[in-house]
Image: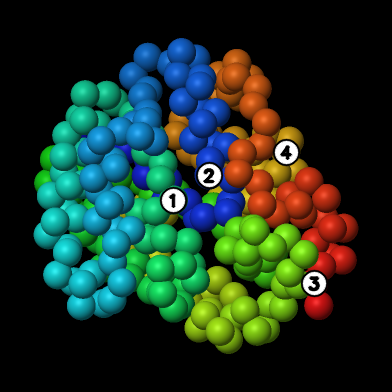
Amino acid sequence: MSRAVLHIGLHKTGTSFIQRRIEASRASLPYGYSIIPYKNRALGDLVKNTRKIRSLKQAMAERENITARAARLAWICRKQQHTLISHEDILGPVPTRGNIRGLYPYVQEMLPAVLAGFAREGVRVEVAVYRREYNDWLGSVFRYRFRDNPDRTFRPRRFKENNALPENWDEFTERLQESVAGNPLHIVSFERDRASGNHGTGLYSIFGLTNAVQADFVPMAAQNVTDFATVDPKWFESRVA
């Protein structure tokens, strides 16, 4: 049975760097290992569905379409023993965008529909997600939202209240665990990866790539960094009111 590792983000956890680096390093992958490029058409068609959902009613109505598009993506994965798929919009847009309140509120409709598509094609799926210290992550989302106004002060309490965001990851993590429906779920520490000096190593290791393989990856600068705390934690501390 073919195996797919489905990396679903989260947003602002280094996903752009992870995606671009492994795409640039495809020649280093061992036999039997492949990736679905970020701009793959089947993957793009899937996230067009998930990214446009704005209500629970719409999420429920789109489940079969999501499953059908995921099945087309899974059909590609059948050609390899191991395939890595990475896209941060599978659970919808960045929280607080698109007039969506709450923290990935439709995960329990979207993710099971995606996994059903892979099951339809007989592809075994493991789900991987990066999790970052919650308020640090919120700060990065805030700076992304207001990247045209970098001097705007981040007030965590107000940001949470204005967007119906919870105090921590607990409730979302519980919904995510329910949504994988028995498929393996890997929660990777953003901070541990960053401290290693080789961001992405947690996901690449889950995929099955050894340290030796990763050492041959193309060096790459950080991508889409809107949070200066990523390179200077003291900057983040100075901006929190």
Q: Secondary structure at mark 3?
A: loop
* Contact between labelled residues 1 and 2, with CB atoms less than 8 Å apart: yes
**Which residue corresponds to the image point at 46% horizontal and 67% vertical from the top-left?**
97
Q: Nearer the viewer, mark 3 or mark 2?
A: 3
Q: Nearer the viewer, mark 1 or mark 3?
A: 3
Q: Nearer the viewer, mark 4 or mark 3?
A: 3
Q: Is residue 81 left or right of residue 160?
A: left
State which quadrant residue 100 falls in.
Answer: bottom left
* Contact between labelled residues 3 and 4, with CB atoms less than 8 Å apart: no
- Which is nearer the eye, 131 or 239? 239
State which quadrant residue 6 falls in.
Answer: top left
Q: Which residue is mark 2?
A: 15
* Amino acid type of the residue tagged 3 in the rendering: Val
Q: Which residue is mark 3?
A: 240
For the residues marked 4 and 3, what is the alpha-carbon distance in whole angstroms? 26 Å
- Which is nearer the eye, 152 or 89? 152
